Amino acid sequence: MRKENEYISYLQRVCPELKIRSAYINEIGQNNDVLIVNKNIVFRFPKYEKGIQKLRIETQLLEKIRPFITLQIPNPSYQGFQDEVPGKVFAGYEMIEGDPFWKNIFTGINEEKQLQKLACTLAGFLKELHEIPLSTFEGIMQYDSADMYSEINSLYSQLKDYVYPYMREEAKKEVSLSFETYLNEESHFNFTPSLVHGDFGMTNILYSATKKDISGVIDFGGASIGDPAYDFAGILASYGEEFLQLFAAYYPNLEAVKERMYFYKSTFALQEALFGVINNDKKAFRAGIAQYV
């Protein structure tokens, strides 16, 4: 049985009120299978066991942050956590208008006024997100601290264990120098923690061609209490520094996060390679490791 038929069968059993007229799997998801039902409802099914708790936390987070956010974000009106195994756990929400803000769409925008508008919308979203009082997340996640030193050190250890065996020697030396230099500078860890989206890039930013503006933000599965610079690293990696500089007019003290932001960006491909190794995702591994072999 094709995977979408299995999902349809399960949804019809646990959501009898949902009349399914059409359904297909969207192939973009790395951590979740994404099923589009009736062309307007998005269902996300975690592919891996560790994704189940992440989805549960994400649905709770979305409920908490919605009052603070102007842009549209998912509103999971369908939730299934009865059978906690991959393929049975899901969250479903009405599709938000727009398409992923791919690089080719972005590079096709030449009007300065529209670029300023996009920067204003995205910076406004991040400002709202990063300013949500952390006590809002009591009971959902640990909110009173963010140990970025331990997180980065742990990432470095995992890379050495799982990814370094596939890397050329010179690349290993460069990456080790980058991590050790960063970890040895205390000022890199002196920041005010905030809720960060955690995967703020092309696939999760939606663009409306009719409104010529950002229409929504999706996939808060990587959200955590951490360094706000991480979200700007996502913008930097997706659209470049020239566009990011426009954010300075709408997000205070952007210059202060610059060094941290560049470091985080430098880890993205390595994180994708690590994900590929751990989850046996060959496509993710090839994409992440390409520049290091």
Image (spheres, grey):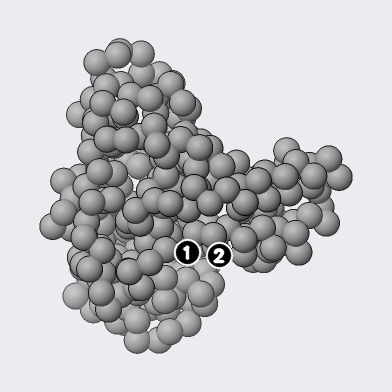
Q: Is residue 57 visible?
A: no
Q: What residue does disc 2 label? A: 150
Instruction: Residue type at mark 1: give it.
Output: Asp
Q: What residue does disc 1 label? A: 147
Q: Is residue 248 visible?
A: yes
Mark 1 Cα-neighbour bin, 10 Å: few <14, some 14–19, many ≥20: few
**Cα separation between marks 2 and 1:** 6 Å
Judge by depth and name the residue closer to the eye, 231 or 183.
183
Q: Secondary structure at mark 2?
A: helix
Q: Position of residue 290 (x, y in %)?
A: 73, 41
Judge by depth and name the residue closer to the eye, 257 or 234.
257
Which residue lies most toward the right here?
A: 169
Which residue lies most toward the front here?
A: 186
| 94 vs 85: above or below | above
Say if mark 2 contacts mark 1, CB within 8 Å.
yes
Q: Position of residue 24 (x, y in %)?
A: 41, 57
Mark 2 Cα-neighbour bin, 10 Å: few <14, some 14–19, many ≥20: few
